[in-house]
Image (cartoon, helix red, strand yellow):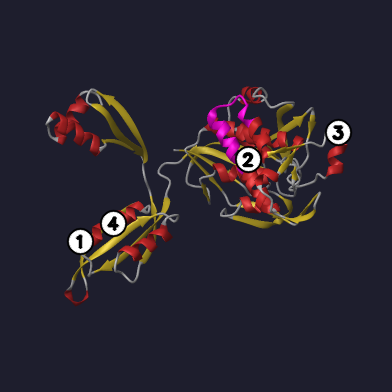
Amino acid sequence: MKLLYFDLGMGAAGDMLTAALLELLPDRDSFLEELNHIGLPEVSVTAEPSVKCGITGTHVSVRIRGVEEGGEVPHDHIHTHEHNHEHTHDHEHTHDHGHDHHHASLTDVEHIISHLAVSEKVREDALNVYRLIAEAESRAHGKPVPEIHFHEVGTMDAIADVTAVCMLMERLNPDKVVASPVHVGSGHVHCAHGIMPVPAPATAYLLQGIPTYGGGIDGELCTPTGAALLKHFVDEFGDQPVMRVGAISYGMGKKDFETANCLRAMLGEAEGAAETVYELSCNVDDMTAEKISFAMERLFEAGAREVYTVPVGMKKSRPGTWLRVICTGETKQALIRQIFLHTSTIGIRETSAKRYVLDREIVTLDTPWGALRRKDCSGYGVSRSKYEYEDLARIAREQNISIDEAAEMLRDAGF
């Protein structure tokens, strides 16, 4: 399994994610050439080496009409650019750069993205990331999404960052993305509306449900654009999984801190990465087989990974049933409610365990006997394949042969 891991000990920003992912490509120059010809008006993207605290990485610069923007402002006329890792712009500073004071709505941004010369997947990913940003700004400022507007220059800058990350993720195509908890920094940031706490309100909304921590660094380390990209692409937050690292990269921020201002990415292979599963169990001695069967059906519908029963002897020498449900943390609470609803138990036990699985893929084969699905599994030095039962049974019925004969016939035919 191809695994991508982000070390977010210095937070995340769009330019840092772009630079870190860019370093993982063997053909960086050709990617930049492609990025600069996707149709972003008056935008140019360059990459150059950067050294922070003795570590060499890559810094990505986005220039609008030849000028590199320097920060982002989390207010109704939002700068969504973040290369300084802090909110530094106000209206006066923006005019110092000589930019016209125009603004774009989310509809304008969607129009720009929809006309870029990128794949449909990249386009949809970029649109979804920007919608996350707009929704967070809407919540932060108490205004409907249509009333949220982005400063024209900051918008083009952020679109470049967002689109670049989406294109790079498509090229790298990891099977799973894991990231460390996000360091958000501490203190306050200055913007046109005044002084705001770190993380800025929109960033805080975007990071809801994601493990974060602060302190140590006085400044903003995670920006709205960085938070939205993490929220969209990262499958899991936590410690670095067991993996064989094949490539390491460093995406550098512009600002200097005592700690190296970089985002580290690792790309490698992880076989059968462990996941945490939970077992919910209870004993019942006053339910009929029909009621237990109905309960099992409803538990599967509610997201259980596995449901099974074991006959047990209970107190007072009564025969009973031990019901066991395997689930993930996301479905655990819903399944607890379903167990209480559909069984007669008055108590549920919970245990947690690590689950190791082989990588699996369902392949559909075109055979003379119709479509046949085959599950291919590999990992831990083993590989095995198995025909899907329903397809195999259908062929056996149609050919009036046993299931074993059907499987042998398919193997002999090269399937």
Quadrant occupied by the N terminus: top left
Residue at (57%, 49%) from the top-left corner?
180
Q: Nearer the viewer, residue 211 or 284?
A: 284
Left or right of 270? Residue 280 is left
> Picture quarter containing residue 318?
bottom left
Q: Nearer the viewer, residue 41 or 209?
A: 41
Residue 130's label in the rendered image is 2
Expressed as whole percent of the image width and height from the top left, the position of residue 405 reads 14, 31
Mark 4 to mark 1 CA distance (whole Å):
11 Å
Left or right of 196? Residue 32 is left
Residue 98's label in the rendered image is 3
Q: Which of 58 and 141 is in front in this view?
A: 141
Residue 20 seen = yes
Expressed as whole percent of the image width and height from the top left, the position of residue 412 reads 19, 25
Query: How busy is the neighbourhood of tag 4: few (under 14 within 10 Å), some, or many (20 plus)?
Result: many
Q: Earlier in the sequence, mark 4 or mark 1?
A: 1
- The three-letter amino acid code for the residue at tag 4 is Met
Determine whether the residue tagged by mark 4 lies in a helix, strand or loop: helix
Residue at (86%, 38%) from the top-left corner?
95
- The three-letter amino acid code for the residue at tag 1 is Ala
Expressed as whole percent of the image width and height from the top left, the position of residue 368 reads 23, 22
Residue 166's label in the rendered image is none
* Image marks 3 and 2: residues in contact by CB distance under 8 Å: no
Expressed as whole percent of the image width and height from the top left, the position of residue 273 reads 43, 46
Residue at (50%, 37%) from the top-left corner?
268
Q: Which of marks 3 and 2 is nearer the N terminus?
A: 3
> Picture quarter containing residue 408?
top left
